[in-house]
Image (spheres, helix red, strand yellow):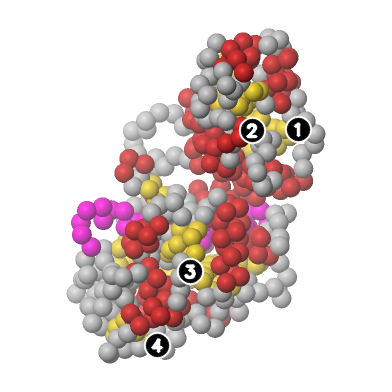
Amino acid sequence: MEFSISALAPERAKTACLVLGVFKGKTAAQAELTPAARRADRAAQGALRAVLAQGDLPGRAGSTVLLRRLAGLAAERVLLVGLGEKSEFDETRFRDVIRSVANALKELAVRDATLYLIGHKLPSREIAWNVRQATLGLREAFYVFDQLKTQKKGPPPALAEVTLALAQGGVPASASRALHESVATADGAALAKTLGNLPSNICTPTYLANEAKKIARQYKLRHEVLERRDMERLGMGALVSVTKGSHQPPKLIVLHYHGAAKSKKPVVLVGKGVTFDTGGISLKPGAEMDEMKYDMSGAASVLGVVRALAAMKAPVNVVGVIPAVENMPGGGASRPGDVVTTLSGQTVEILNTDAEGRLILCDALSYAERFSPEVIIDIATLTGACVIALGHVVSGLFANDRRLAEALVAAGDDAWDRVWHMPLLEDYQEQLRSNFADMANIGGRPAGSVTAACFLARFTRKQRWAHLDIAGTAWKGGREKGSTGRPVPLLVRFVLRHAGGRAA
């Protein structure tokens, strides 16, 4: 799907479908046409108002009505979309409207469309925000994962070209930059979704390593892949312990993107890459265990972010570090009660082999220090406790630096890929006490997401560090089962804002 942005008179837009907004009025006849819709209505000699007066467009936001071949307009079709009450038009309404338009365009099966929606001002938002959300929303709605189906439900979506249009004035430079950024971000999110949706017999640690190599070749990036013997030689006892029950070899994947001066310290992103998590000896219940293929969503998001930044030639330095493993039971698997030595030299008593994410992350976080990072952010589907605490709306955020936490909250709000700042108090460390090692890998049921973060905090005391627990936001279950691609939009926005940079 190709995107463009332009200033264009709506009556002159030669397009298969012209999309125009209408605010709700006290009566159908009093519905308020947006400026672009008013221009189109004048050119069509009141045809739009005539349809509205008949009550064909319900007042709720996202409702639509289709008109064809209106005299005075160059467009083949006009899709009127309800925006709801003008006083209530906010970010959620805007995103809902984009989703509704996308669904309508799917049904129409048109090849191109011109949308006059990004010009509707939202409180405290610039037009760049509208552009990003429109682009990401359309791409998300049209994303399909059917690579493994032999019987397709229907032909692929026809929409190939989208113009985000303004009815008057020129196109601000910030809007053009936002389009460039959002297209690259959408591509990165789509990559993360596809990797997450692939089954674990395909998306193995080796598959993730090969995907990183593809990105490196495509964008001429530097990358390394450490094998089991390399990790053992370094002393990554915690990471290696998770892999002992699996026939799949572990990989530590490192991907470098350098778009700024070499003197600029990088942002290091560490993504949990458990390509399947049975729980190991501490075996999970069978129900919904298939969803544990999504336990590599942190790794997928890191690959998506690096790809997006490279595609937009962002003036930033980023290093992606991905510990990729499979957690399986077996004769060689770690047992509850085993003690392992981490890369940092600290020892860990493994009380639960299903708390494996923190074991691979702690060694990866220690390894990340060699890149002299400005900040380190790890991304992980780490705890079911975070799902209980926050549900599926926001991701959990933990940080040992207040300014870093505030920057991530702000970037999440900007991307509408939001987070909630959780506590990381030293008081919780007592729950990780072990009689036989420096710490245990679990802290009991109370505050499970907090104690998991506190565990990781022991390996990042010298760094400005944040942890994103995406267990509730990385995928959806039920009838809409599938990866969400989060938090790719959040991380792209954070890196760009943090560096004060913008896409080239």
Kind of element beneath mark 3:
strand
Decide if residue 494 is on the left or right side of residue 323.
right
- Circle nearer the N terminus (4, 2): 2
Q: Which amino acid type corresponds to the residue marked 2 in the rendered image?
A: Leu
Q: Looking at the picture, how far across and down is residue 391, in whole percent?
A: 38, 54
- Of badges 1 and 2, nearer the viewer stands 2
243 vs 130, nearest the viewer = 130
Asked if one can make out residue 435 in the rendered structure from this viewpoint, the answer is: yes
Left of 201 or right of it: where is 296? Answer: right
| Lower sequence index among marks 4 and 3 | 4
Question: What's the distance in space between the residues labelled 3 and 1, CA to CA?
Answer: 43 Å
Mark closer to the chain start, 1 or 2: 1
Residue under circle 1? 7
Q: Amino acid at mark 4?
A: Gln
Residue 398 badge: 3
Q: Amino acid at mark 3?
A: Phe
Q: Residue at the location (26% across, 66% down)?
A: 279
Q: Is residue 300 magenta?
A: yes
Q: Are marks 4 and 3 in contact (CB under 8 Å)?
A: no
| Image coordinates for residue 412, horizontal then vertical, percent | 56, 56
Q: Amino acid at mark 1?
A: Ala
Q: Which residues are magenta?
A: 284-313
19, 277: nearer the viewer? 19
Kindly give the residue lying farthest to the right in the view shown: 169
Residue 404 position (above or below residue 19): below
Tell me which numbered mark, 3 or 2, is placed earlier along the sequence: 2
Give the labeled residue for mark 2.
117
Question: Which residue is depicted at the point 59% across and 69% down?
Answer: 404
